[in-house]
Image: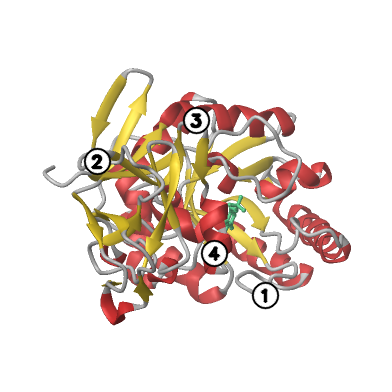
Amino acid sequence: MFRTNYCEINLEAIRNNVRVMKSFSGDARFLAVVKANAYGHGAVPVARAALEAGADWLAVAIPEEGIELRESGIDVPILILGGTEPGATMAIIENDLTQVVFDDLMVDAFAAAAARCRGNAKLQIGLDTGMCRIGVRTPEEAARLAAKIDATPGLLLTGCFTHMATADEEDPTGTHQQIARFKAMCEAIDAVYGKPLIHHAANTASIFCWPEIHADMVRGGIALYGYPPVPGVSGLMHAMRWITRGVLVKTIEAGERVSYGGLFEAKKPTRVMTVPVGYADGYDRGLSLKGSVLVRGRRAPILGRVCMDQIMVDVSEIPEASVGDEVVLMGQQGDEEISAEEIAGLLGTISYEVLCSPSARVPRVYINQEQKETV
Ligand SMILES: Cc1ncc(COP(=O)(O)O)c(C=O)c1O
């Protein structure tokens, strides 16, 4: 690693955050949502830390993410939350992954694959209770699919689940509706299936706000990384810091313009630090002229446009700032912090998207007390 630009991931924060969510979840099993490379934090180390802190299940979005976890030796149940191409069925069975299904096409594809490899496909029925994304939409359809899975050799139903669309909002109407539909669909499935299933619905917001839908398992995502989607939750720790180092400090004259398009013009002599991060690293170009970074525990505003690989920041108010200083793009430095939520606010998005944004070019460095390891 030659270029100093990396995300520091604190695995102790992940463990802490699992413990916080579990303290809200009673006897429900805990599923750690590690899709999208664990929201940008690195799937395998985060999954391991979550399991150490008591997670029972893991969830991913696509088969490739589940296979990555299996190849690292992780052997707990892994649920694929998104729809899958028929071509992936054999790999899903061979890697002992659990797939959400919601129509006959998928069930038939798994039945054929299970027969071909003489294995068992583990399935869960997705229930669309109000999000209009994936899932069967009525109790009758849910029961029909459950009965079909039950009657088909090589298929094993292990659960059914829905996803909450507005559990983080003040208006409870949509959530009440979803809970009622969820219960009706679960009852319809249980009536035809007969064997115990894991029913689950709760995302992070529901873990904190809707104990009535904790059911048999909760699925913790964003709070695993330290960001609660609802106010009033304490004890979580932000797991990611994005760090680099200044490569040049100089003073420009009044009238000089900075970066592409010359959008920033210095009104007075200005000390400018060049920082090696850009939109190719996932540092959003929307932060041009808006964002800031931390140098020596103080804020340095971005001057002009974010380039592909570099930005320029104003260190006029930080006279000690020098080449080689640590520059924090996201996270804490001294008493200051630039959170993913703050960046999301500047960009008109949510912390989820900001955490997922550092690109593959940015290594993840894991800290775990004194131990540091890079993958
Ligand atoms: C099906 C499903 N369950 C759980 C989650 C986790 O949500 P959150 O990060 O809000 O906890 C997601 C995330 O998008 C999801 O799609």
Query: Which quadrant would residue 133 be assigned to in this image?
Result: bottom right
- The amino acid on which the numbered mark 4 sits, given as a three-letter code, is Leu
Q: Which callout, 3 or 1, points at the residue further toward the start of the chain? A: 3
Query: Which quadrant would residue 303 be assigned to in this image?
Result: bottom left
Judge depth for marks 2 and 1 and give the one in front. Answer: 2
Q: Which callout, 4 or 1, points at the residue further toward the start of the chain? A: 1
Q: Which callout, 3 or 4, points at the residue further toward the start of the chain? A: 3
Q: In what quadrant of the picture does the C terminus appear? A: top left
| Relative depth, front residue between 261 and 266 | 266
The residue that mark 3 highlights is 13
The residue that mark 4 highlights is 346
The residue that mark 2 highlights is 322
Check the image and name the residue furthest to the top: 370
**Mark 2 → mark 1, Cα distance in angstroms:** 53 Å
| Relative depth, front residue between 33 and 10 | 10
Residue 22, image x, y percentages: 66, 30
- The amino acid on which the numbered mark 1 sits, given as a three-letter code, is Cys
